[in-house]
Image (cartoon, rainbow, N blue to C red):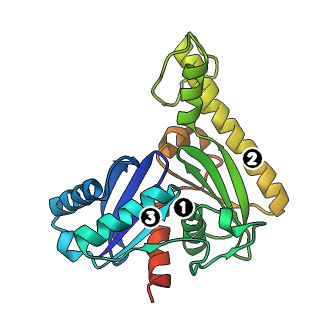
Amino acid sequence: MLLVLDIGNTNTSIGVFDKDSLVAHYNLSSDIKKSDDEYGILLVTMLNHHNLTDKITGSIISSVVPQLGEIFSMAIQKYLNISSLNLSHKSKMPIKLALENNKEIGADRIANASAAKIKYSLPAIVIDFGTATTFDIVDENSNFIGGIIAPGLKIQAKALSQFTSKLPKLKIEAPNDAIGKNTISAMLSGIVLGHKCMIEGMIKLCEKELNKKATIIATGGYSPVLFNDLDKTIDYIDKDLTLFGLKELYYLNKD
């Protein structure tokens, strides 16, 4: 079985694949203060819960936090006795990176673009709703030509409460109306529906530059919040897209 880890700025998503089937999925907070021993014990505890510890034979890591990537690599080596493949712009992939500086691209975005190439028709736009909301664009010739990075929903909500004295913290959820009747609903409208309008507008601009209708795929932790309001714009919601991409990239690179 294969252990895949998508380490983000806020959360770490962990999956276990038995061939092509995702048989377990876990989420941890991304915390650089934790040691390799702490993460190793957490991993073993979670895997033992599903009797998977002794069945793991391979591992791949995507990390946008280099220090955490190293910590998890050490934890997996120490507690599972497995060397991890660390995804980077130098890895083999089913797409071609066509950016001004390929070193800048995050490994998670490589996984998303690779998964889009394998699973969906091209051109494709992957919208990942994480700490940041990112767009990854793959053209009809399988070139990863670039993308968009915008503040995510959580960042926007935190910024509003942090930099204004009277606005409260809030739970991210879809508002019923655009016109807020109270402070909370007004904030949710600005954050969630404003984000929705940004996404719709950016998709139109990207498709204009592609000169073609694209397949739109949503993924990431906050994608369900927005999906009902974007059902005419988004073709697929695929919450495990990054993990699937990591699985495919492992088998492409394992030798």
Residues at marks 2 and 1, CA–CA distance in whole angstroms: 21 Å
Q: Where, by quadrant of the figure, is residue 26 drawn?
A: bottom left
Q: Which of 38 and 43 is in front in this view?
A: 38
Secondary structure state at the residue bearing disc 1: helix
**Dividing the picture into quarters, in which one does residue 135 lie?**
bottom right
Q: Earlier in the sequence, mark 3 or mark 2?
A: 2
**Tag 3–tag 1 contact (CB < 8 Å):** no
Relative to 53, residue 218 above or below: above
Identify the residue under disc 1: 108
Nearer to the camera, 52 or 127 = 52
Q: Say what secondary structure mark 3 lies in.
A: helix
- The residue singled out by tag 3 in the image is 243
Q: Is residue 227 above or below residue 100?
A: above
Q: How crowded is mark 2: few (under 14 residues within 10 Å), some or many (20 or more)?
A: some
Residue ID at (75%, 71%): 98
Q: Name the residue under label 2.
A: 202
Report the mark closest to the observer, 3 or 1. Answer: 1
- Please state the horizontal and vertical placement of residue 145, each as a whole percent of the image: 74, 66
Distance of mark 3 from mark 2, alpha carbons?
25 Å
Cα separation between marks 3 and 1: 9 Å
* Foreground: disc 2 or disc 1: 1
